[in-house]
Amino acid sequence: MNTEFKKQILRRIPYGLYVVGVVDGEEVSGFTATWLAQCSFDPPLLMMAVRADSRSGSLIKNGRAFSINFLDKSQSDLAKTFFKPPDRAGNKLGEVEFHTGLTGAPLLELAQAYLECKVVEIVEHGDHHVVIGEVIDAQVCREGDSLMLSDTNWSYGG
Ligand SMILES: Cc1cc2nc3c(=O)[nH]c(=O)nc-3n(C[C@H](O)[C@H](O)[C@H](O)COP(=O)(O)O)c2cc1C
C-alpha cells in the first residue's frame, strides 16, 4: 500500500468538529472530536471514535453517557480549548459556561445545538474505541451552519 495515498485519502473524508461532553459521577469534562456519524434511524444511534488512552475515554466507559455540542463556524477557538489532555489544560470546563443535561453530561451555553446520548455499546479495537450512543435528547439553540473540520487548518486522520 502507498501509505502517503492512504493518509491523503483518509483525510478527504468530510467531518464535523464538536465538543463532546463527558461525565462520570462528580467529574465532568469535554474533548474536541471529529470522528462521529449517525449509524441507525430507529433507535437513533451515533458512533464516535474515542482515543483508547484518553481521560475522556475512561469517563465515557464508566459514566456511560456523553453530549455532542455543535459549534458555529466562528467558534473554532472554543474547539481549541478542548484539544489538550487535562494534565496540560487543567479543568477544561473551568472557564466555559455549561449546564448539565438528563445524563449529567455538560451542555455548553455557547453551543448552537446539542445531542445527548446514553452509551449502548463500546467496540474496543485499535487505538480508538467506537462508542455507540443512543440519542435521548436534542436541542437547537440557534440556526446556522455548523463548524466542519474543513473550516479549520487542523487535520485528524490518515
Ligand atoms: C481536530 C481534532 C480532532 C480530534 N478528534 C478526535 C476524535 O474524534 N476522537 C478522539 O478521541 N480524539 C480526538 N481528538 C483528540 C482529543 O481532542 C485529545 O486527545 C484530547 O486531549 C482528549 O481529551 P482528554 O485528554 O481530556 O480525554 C481530536 C483532536 C483534534 C485537534
Image (cartoon, helix red, strand yellow):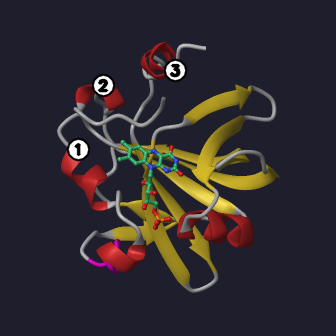
- Residue sticking out furthest to the bottom: 26
Evaluate if marks 3 and 2 touch, with contact meaning CB atoms under 8 Å apart: no
Q: Quadrant of residue 98?
A: bottom left
User: How many discs appear?
Assistant: 3
The crowding category of the residue bearing disc 1, from other C-alpha atoms within 10 Å (few below 14, some 14 to 19, many at least 20), is some
Instruction: Name the residue beneath numbered marker 2.
Output: 150
Q: Closer to the N terminus: mark 2 or mark 1?
A: 1
Instruction: Look at the image and tell me whether residue 59 can be seen.
Output: yes
> Can you tell which of label 2 and label 1 is closer to the viewer?
2
Instruction: First in sequence, mark 3 or 2: give its number.
Output: 3
- Bounds of the magenta span? 90-94
Q: Calculate the distance from the C-alpha at mark 3 to the C-alpha at mark 1.
A: 29 Å
- Tell which circle, 3 or 1, labels the residue nearer the N-terminal end: 3
Residue 24 sits in quarter: bottom right
Nearest-to-viewer mark from 3 and 1: 3
Measure the alpha-carbon separation of dots 2 and 1: 11 Å
Read off the residue under disc 1: 76
- Structural distance between the alpha carbons of marks 3 and 2: 22 Å
Disc 1 on helix, strand or loop? helix
Residue 19 horizontal/vertical position (percent)? 41, 52
Q: Which mark is residue 3?
A: 3
Cβ–Cβ below 8 Å for labels 3 and 1?
Answer: no
Residue drawn at the location 43% of the way across and 22% of the way down: 11
Q: Magenta stretch containing residue 133, yes or no?
A: no
Which amino acid does the dot numbered 1 rest on?
Answer: Ser
Give left or right: position of 72 versus 56.
left
Q: Is residue 117 above or below residue 42?
A: below
